[in-house]
Amino acid sequence: MHPDDTAPIPAAAVSAAPPASAVPAGPTEDAEPAEPAGPPGTGLTEDQADLRDAVRSFLAGRPGAPWGRFARELGVAGLAVPEEYGGAGCGPAEQAVVCEELGRVLSPHPYLATAVLAVEALRAAADPEAMARLLPAIADGSRTATVLLPGDADLVLSRGRLTGTAPCALDGEVVLAFAGDELVEAAPSSRTPLTTLDQTRPLVALSFDAVPVRPAGDGAVRDRVRDAGVACLAAEQVGGAAACLEAAVEHALRRHQFGRPIGSFQAVKHKLADLLLLVESARSAALAAVRALPSEFPVAAAIAGSYCTEAYLAAAGENIQIHGGTGVTWEHPAHRHLKRAAADAQLFGPPQAHRARLAAAAGL
């Protein structure tokens, strides 16, 4: 992924940027909804809280379940798929609930690529034939998909054939690519799995040797698709950061030194208190992004991408520090969150790239 290719934000959107704690409507709504009436302190509606509990229970009880079973039994792959194509017709707020739970357990499920990027690309590009062809199989979990965004691949579309390479892409059976002014579906000539720092999120190198393509819609929606990915990745990062905080607190209560739990020492208390503030602030930023109005979405996504990325990196690092020597061993899971956090920081661009978008939009 290439961080410098993050698209600029329209200047008019900056003045409408919501605070991190705001709870505006989703990107497909025209009016702001009422404050969520779910469990206090969660920022979720009752339905969203039930969805969170169902996903968390499934992941805890069947950690090795394949994607098809996860998608089919919970119906999560089709959350944002329109009902006429077999989905639930929900929005990014519900997708974010699933992403946060997947991030907590470092799940390898291709939810971000398939249920977020691919579904958003097909919905936004609005090609009826492509949606009818691809969305039902995505919704029922029988096919996975991925999207090649501008900057992620060097592609040339000429006379209905695609040529080029994508050196590092999220994996998926169906490949959608933004090439020129079009969104197309293409079968790669080769697909090479990559050995990466974070082995919980499979990445591949794809090549296209003048392969025929099928139109999938208007390529002008590329920025919207990227922002959807950034916002849902932010929710994943919040889940990972929350898991790091919980692990650090549990260890601080259990580990004794000088006859006392190390959590009773002021320095450790301060670390954990700062970490709690960081995680909850990140959650507010992620919630604001997935509930932003369309005009505010680019700014809200950039804020979430910047803040949540750094929050996850900090939480993963502090978790290792509080665990001490145990935290740096291969046998302990703490290192896996640090690897995921570092890899996530490059997926749609580092925090600096997101802040550069905000600065450019503000004329700074």
Image (tube, grey):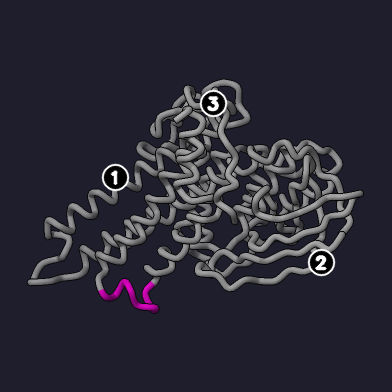
Tell whether label 2 touches label 3 (CB within 8 Å). no
User: Which one is in front, 63 or 256?
Assistant: 256
* Residue drawn at (41%, 43%) of the image: 283
Residue topped by disc 2: 189
**Circle 2 residues within 10 Å: few <14, some 14–19, many ≥20:** some
What whole-number distance in Å separates the C-alpha atoms at marks 3 and 1? 30 Å
Residue topped by disc 1: 277
**Which quarter of the rendering shows the N terminus?**
bottom right
Mark number for residue 324? none
Q: Amino acid at mark 1?
A: Leu
Q: Amino acid at mark 3?
A: Ala
Residue topped by disc 3: 11
Q: Which residues are magenta?
A: 325-332
- Residue 42 visible here: yes
* Residue drawn at (22%, 63%) of the image: 252
**Circle 1 residues within 10 Å: few <14, some 14–19, many ≥20:** few
